[in-house]
Image (spheres, grey):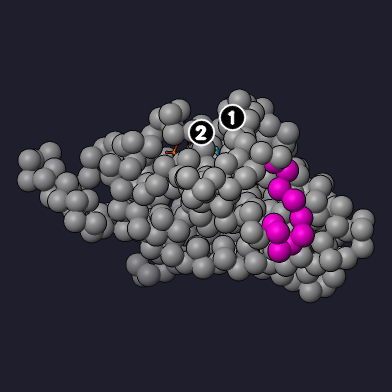
Amino acid sequence: PGEDLEAYFADVIDADQKIEPRDWMPEAYRRTLIRQIAQHAHSEIIGMQPEGNWISRAPSLKRKAILLAKVQDEAGHGLYLYAAAETLGISRDELVELLISGRQKYSSIFNYPTLTWADVGAIGWLVDGAAIVNQVPLCRCSYGPYARAMIRVCKEESFHQRQGYEILHTLSHGTPAQKAMAQDAIDRWWYPSLAMFGPPDGDSTHSAQSMAWKIKRFSNDELRQRFVDMCVQQAEILGLTLPDADLRWNDERQAYDYTQPDYDELMRVIKGDGPCNRQRMEHRRRAHDEGAWVREAAAAYAAKQAERQKE
Ligand code: FAQ
């Protein structure tokens, strides 16, 4: 590239302006964004499975309608994100192939099972809560299409988080068995949710470069801390306990001290060896294969329309 182009790119980043699809960008910047946005898109799509598991067993028609809407939102987020990734010069077909062949990842969190209805509440409160903490700064990411997609996604995530919190609040103020079910769900989802923020800063391979490019605005540990600080008070209001005996306010740091998640477990889950990795991938492959006729029909229809326009 010419020096002018590189200087222009650096100036845009420096001035907190946006890089747009037609602008020159370093190849590594493009590759990092494709990796992160694709992983994010795949997470939304795979993330429909754990909650989808409860649509047919939601405890009331109202709960079912809310959950259906939430899972549909996740499909929508996946689509915005695939569209944002496509502006970087990769096709949707390629992205789907990279997921299905296991060459691109999705968030570790979706490899844990949803055992009870309370898990739907815990996912909303903790998993969507963690997603918001991670994604609000991405609204200021240096790549325009990703930043803009995040604004809408975050608004919907806020509703998702509230619905999860409300499920847990209802259970926690219900019968002793319902309260115990809510507590059990929090006990199982707390540490996997902390692990969503990625490895600790010292082991995070991409953070320094991504922060210099203003793709990431805060480090993994900074966001994890922010999430812990947010959850403590919310748990108190719920009347439920976070499963960490060492959780305490640190006056000096003005933040809560807390127990780190098991990062060896995170690495195992990322590498494909979590409780539900195989099941999630099998389901996605089967859904993709079963949808082949829809893609073929849509392509045939588009070809026919294009042919007609020529006439
Ligand atoms: N899971 O150097 P870093 C949602 C990988 S929310 C799997 O720190 P980076 C909403 C990482 O890719 C979930 N892999 O990496 C929802 C890298 O591997 P690579 C999705 C992980 O990128 C709720 C390696 O470890 N949200 O879907 C994880 O700078 C309910 C080294 O790590 C996003 O994707 C992990 N937890 O920081 C939907 C947000 N952590 O690629 C449905 C956007 C790390 O070199 C239902 N992404 N890795 O092979 C990000 O902010 C970043 O990519 C991080 C990781 C923070 C996740």
Whether residue 136 appears in this view of the structure is yes
Residue situated in front as seen by the camera: 142 or 83: 142
Residue bearing mark 2: 199
Mark 1 residue CB less than 8 A from any atom of ligand 1: no
- Relative to the observer, which residue lies in front, 265 or 173? 173
Give the residue at x 63% y 62%: 161
User: Seen in the image, is 225 located left or right of residue 123?
Assistant: left
Element assignment for label 2 = loop
Q: What distance separates the C-alpha of mark 1 from that of mark 2?
A: 7 Å
Give the residue drawn at x 72%, y 54%: 122
Q: Which residues are magenta?
A: 235-244
Mark 2 CB in 8 Å range of ligand 1? yes
On screen, 234 above or below 14?
A: below
Q: In the figure, 203 relative to 7: above or below?
A: above
Q: Are marks 1 and 2 in contact (CB under 8 Å)?
A: yes
Q: Is residue 64 above or below residue 256?
A: below
Determine which residue is flagged by label 1: 263
Image coordinates of residue 307 in percent, x first then y, are 41, 64
Q: Main secondary structure of the magenta part?
A: loop
Q: Which residue: 84% across, 66% down?
A: 173
Would residue 152 appear left or right of 245 to someone viewing this image? left
Q: Amino acid at mark 2?
A: Pro
Residue closer to the observer: 126 or 60: 126
Q: Amino acid at mark 1?
A: Tyr
Q: Secondary structure at mark 1?
A: helix
Q: Position of residue 88 (x, y in %)?
A: 33, 48
Name the residue at 42% across, 69% down: 308
In which quadrant is the C terminus drawn?
Answer: bottom left
Q: Quadrant of residue 128?
A: bottom right
Residue closest to the far front: 251
